[in-house]
Image (spheres, helix red, strand yellow):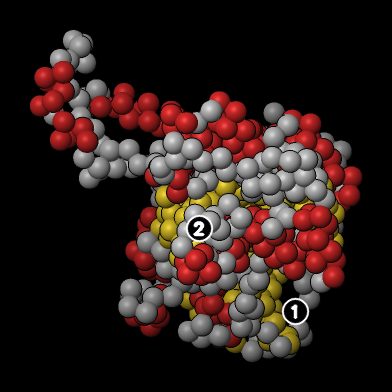
Amino acid sequence: MALNLDSIGKPIGPVTKEYTWKDVVLYALGVGAGFNELEYCYEKDLKVLPSFSIASILNIDFLAILAETTNINLAGILHGEQELIFHNPIPTEGTLTTTGSVTHIYDKGDKGALVVAEFDTVHSNGKKLYTSIVTLFSRLDGGFGGPDAPVKEVVFPDRDPDHVIEGVPTKDQPLIYRLTGDVFQLHVDPEFAKMAGFEKPIMHGLCTHGYACRALTQSLFPGKPEQMRRMTCRFSKTLYPGEAVKTLVWETGDGQALWKTVHSETGVEIITNGECEYGDVVEETVRFDDRVAVVTGAGAGLGRAYALELAKRGAKVVVNDLGGARDGSGKGTSSPAEAVVKEIRDLGGEAVANFDNVATPEGGENIIKTAVDAFGSVDIVINNAGILRDKSFTKMAPENWASVLAVHLNGAYNVTRPAFRVMKEKGYGRIIMTTSAAGLYGNFGQTNYSAAKMALVGLMNALKIEGAKYDIKVNTVAPLAASRLTEDIMPEDLFKKMKPEFVSPMTLFLCSEECPVSGNIYNVGMGFFNRAAMVTGGGAVVGDGETVPSPEALMAKLEDITTMDQGKEFQHLNDQVGEIMAAFSPKG
């Protein structure tokens, strides 16, 4: 099949990988580290080699996903070039989430084709760790009439290198390295290697790349792998296990170096065109430059705090507020929204006001239209608008029930739906739902409010699935904050401590490009943060699955049914159904 040129720009992932300190150590051992570099091999004061980053991506079938996306011919595929850009130090354990896309496909004529893909990897701590730019050379896919790749030349200094670091992989090195995830037969199976044209199994190119990374670290910033900022190279020749290599390093400027890895005996370049940049880690800040945010109910309280902080960090903001009373009554006024817009503009930010009612489909459409007309797009939606009409259940009149659901639940639907269309087309979006402890746990006199707030969690759960492949992340906050909805409900001394600004950090993080999660719920208030989740117990089978069990049989296993000792989260309806089906499958 021909290369799929339409694959350019289409999202790939997210793909997740959990790892522990043992994976970090195994990788270091796989690329030749040992007692001479104990900081990479011993869990006490453990550090992570920067090149672990590329192994963590490519050894989780990312190449297979990339091949499927592009229709690249696997029979002629080679890893041509590799660039790594480091944003934050790599922790010794956690979960990595990688997303990316094909950025270019170049035609080299009868020589083949180049497929370039770029991936970002984010840690479960919320920080973006590294960007990987992979260039694959496909010998069998050229001649389709596309553009040629730009010429890039690295000129090495005409002098001896400043550092020469020798590495001697053992004859068994591939057997260790392949345990990190790259189990391709070419590196272990003699018959397969001969069939591929080699006299015996060859070294993994990324294993040699790891030797080069160790050499750069030793020579330029020993013991401080977190100082690696950028590492790029081109793979030139294959190497057999047991053959020694030398990495030659030229320091070319402040925090800059050129490098190549050569065969120690023949001088043949195994890896060339190497560039390295290094230095102290620059503190990462959450910014929203060129992002457009819509905040509903932003005339006061939480919404105002969100809008101001987003604008301070570079976002263009649509400040929506109907300006009605706390219970939603009245015709509304433009004053609250206009006042917040003035605050933002006085601070040098960009904002426009909107006074539409989120409770109507027309209002929701017009709120998003305001964003598109004023700023050209929408990237962030914070569904914050709300009203209260508290009554005990027997006194809960239908109009009070319907009005609260219309603002909280229908309002989120009315605003999010037109925004989702824009986000889906552009391949990016961040959506925040606002739930409440009343919805998650219940509260007397708030059946309408609790029902609406819990329904928003269901809306998030479905929308996170629909948005996943478009990099649209949907999360929910349950704020505990001072607002006009809570000013006469909570004690005065507690009310004073619950500044809305304490909720902003979590909401802004979930709105950011750095946010790695989707489908999560967070309780937030007064500087305290925790995650809430729907957890399902391990359960028990009652009967044989063929005959309907009796209530008495169920009672006999009630403890096993109700215990949460083996509770787990499900990310999809099918996961939970699969769990039920598995309960009746024979156990190995």
| Left or right: 153 in relation to 236 | right
Residue at 25% across, 27% down:
583
| Quadrant housing residue 528 | bottom left
Amino acid type at circle 1 is Phe
On screen, residue 442 above or below 187: above
Q: Which residue is mark 1?
A: 156
Report the disc number at residue 109: none
10 Å crowding of disc 2: few (<14), some (14-19), many (20+)? many
User: x and y percent of residue 394 in the render?
Assistant: 43, 29
Q: Residue furthest top?
A: 547
CA gap between label 2 and label 1 equals 60 Å
| Left or right: 356 in relation to 482 | right
Which dot, 2 or 1, sits closer to the camera?
A: 2
Q: Which residue is mark 2?
A: 480
Residue at 76% across, 84% down:
157
Residue at 81% across, 55% down:
335
Q: Residue furthest front?
A: 395
User: x and y percent of residue 294 in the render?
Assistant: 74, 50
Q: Residue furthest right?
A: 373
On screen, residue 134 above or below 312: above
- 585 or 479: nearer the eye? 479
- 59 or 525: nearer the eye? 525
Question: From this viewpoint, is residue 201 visible?
Answer: no
User: x and y percent of residue 441 in the render?
Assistant: 39, 44
N-terminal-most mark, 2 or 1: 1
10 Å crowding of disc 1: few (<14), some (14-19), many (20+)? some
Q: Secondary structure at mark 2?
A: loop
Residue at 89% across, 45% down:
373
Question: From this viewpoint, is residue 355 visible?
Answer: yes
